[in-house]
Amino acid sequence: MNYDTIILGAGAAGMMCATHCGGRALVIDHAKAPGKKIRISGGGRCNFTNLHAGPGNFLSQNPHFSKSALARYTQWDFIDLVERHHIDWHEKTLGQLFCDGSSKQIIQMLLDEMARVGAELWVQTTFHSLRKTESGFSLEVEREGNRISLTCRNLVLATGGKSIPKMGATGLAYDIARQFGLKVTETRAALVPFTFSDGRFKDLSGVSLPVRLSNQRTSFDEALLFTHRGLSGPSVLQLSSYWREGEVIRVNLIPGLGLFELLRDQRQAGGRKALTTELARHLPSRLVDYLKHHFQMQGNLADQSDAALTDLVAALSDWHLTPAGTEGYRTAEVTLGGIDTQGLSSKTMEAREVPGLYVIGEAVDVTGWLGGYNFQWAWSSGHAAGSAI
Ligand code: FDA
């Protein structure tokens, strides 16, 4: 069977590409249903883009690579598509856009768009082999127990990264890229919780608060969540993409609070209140209980000298922690790194040395922050390849 374009992977990027590539197009996936990650994303409501999406929200060995695709298919283009399909949406926080209803609406929208342009979809199809031919590519796949030979002029790799193997993530795009001489950068689990081997935060599990979390390279002002195994929450997931094993992370538990002045004023107003009681007005009380021992907080406010208050505020605003590791690909939202952008055209996503071979979405070494950025990259890169084909 011959197609103009075969797209491996019916995720966000693959389906978007199929709606734009024209000609006779086939999307292949080994999963039972398309868009599994879309379905579970954003707690079932899909954080489908971000109002502030721009190249600065992405990590890559080449920070300029994402510019062209993001500029030619923007968050506004995707919002327009969502509105044309009468999907209601809202901004939750920090420009993050979610469906009012269900993430299934986004999947259905992409399937409707594919049907509109006549793109075919084969799920539960196993990829076996691939080789280059004079006019394109030849593939062997298995579907419903039958071995099928396919040929195509254009082949699009859209099988994503390695995160959450249980959901069907494989390294297929990397393997095929290597087969054709493309380089793959180091890959790591990203947007992933930190673990601490000693279970030190077990008693704080479930406590959440706004923090500023930083390392030497960057910082994020978002919520932090203590878990049985370590730390999670948006600030932690964000920082994990910039973290390396063995590095210290710094937690400011009181960003923008002016705690020294607050404590000093309370001391002046009487001072018979216990220091920890006053602190529990500004921080979760379970956390204050934990920190009491850690930072040796004792006595009433009246017992605290200015110097002691200064030391306490300094400790609370710059708590140093060294995670043992991360939860890894088992729970990571994305894979950092991927197919090296050096071998790809930033305008079309086509491999420079292999005409007709395209790579899009998470498989590429472009990784977004938490907050709808990764889907925007899937839409933009899918559109870039689709329009070029
Ligand atoms: P994606 O992984 O979506 O699709 C790849 C497809 O290829 C899959 O359908 C898979 O079955 C198929 N495939 C893989 N190997 C194959 C093989 N060997 N043979 C055949 N098919 C194969 N992002 C965001 O912007 N907002 C959000 O709210 C969230 N939320 C979120 C929650 C969770 C739990 C996760 C794990 C991830 C997110 N993300 C997110 C990240 C986002 O889901 C991700 O970046 C995109 O889905 C990437 O789109 P792709 O199309 O590149 O890959």
Image: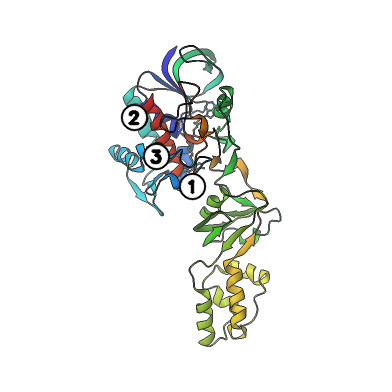
CA–CA distance between discs 1 and 2?
27 Å
**Mark 2 vs ligand 1: CB below 8 Å:** no
Can residue 306 be seen by looking at this rendering?
A: yes
Give the secondary structure at mark 1. Answer: loop
Label disc, if present, on residue 70 of the rendered structure: 3
Which percent across, then down, holds residue 75? Answer: 36, 43
Can you identify the residue that label 1 sits on? 369
Label disc, if present, on residue 113 of the rendered structure: 2
Q: Is residue 307 above or below residue 222?
A: below
Which percent across, then down, holds residue 302? Answer: 59, 86
Would you say the residues marked 3 and 2 are in contact, meaning their CB atoms lie under 8 Å apart? no
Q: Amino acid at mark 1?
A: Trp
Nearer the observer, 284 or 329: 329
Between discs 1 and 2, the one toward the N terminus: 2
Between discs 3 and 2, the one toward the N terminus: 3
Give the quarter of the figure containing the C terminus: top left
**Mark 1 vs ligand 1: CB below 8 Å:** no
| Mark 3 burial class by Cα count in 10 Å: few <14, some 14-19, many 20+ | many
Specify the quadrant of the image occupied by residue 21. top left
Q: Nearer the viewer, mark 3 or mark 2?
A: 3
Q: Amino acid at mark 2?
A: Glu
CA–CA distance between discs 1 and 3?
14 Å
Q: Amino acid at mark 3?
A: Leu
| Mark 1 burial class by Cα count in 10 Å: few <14, some 14-19, many 20+ | many
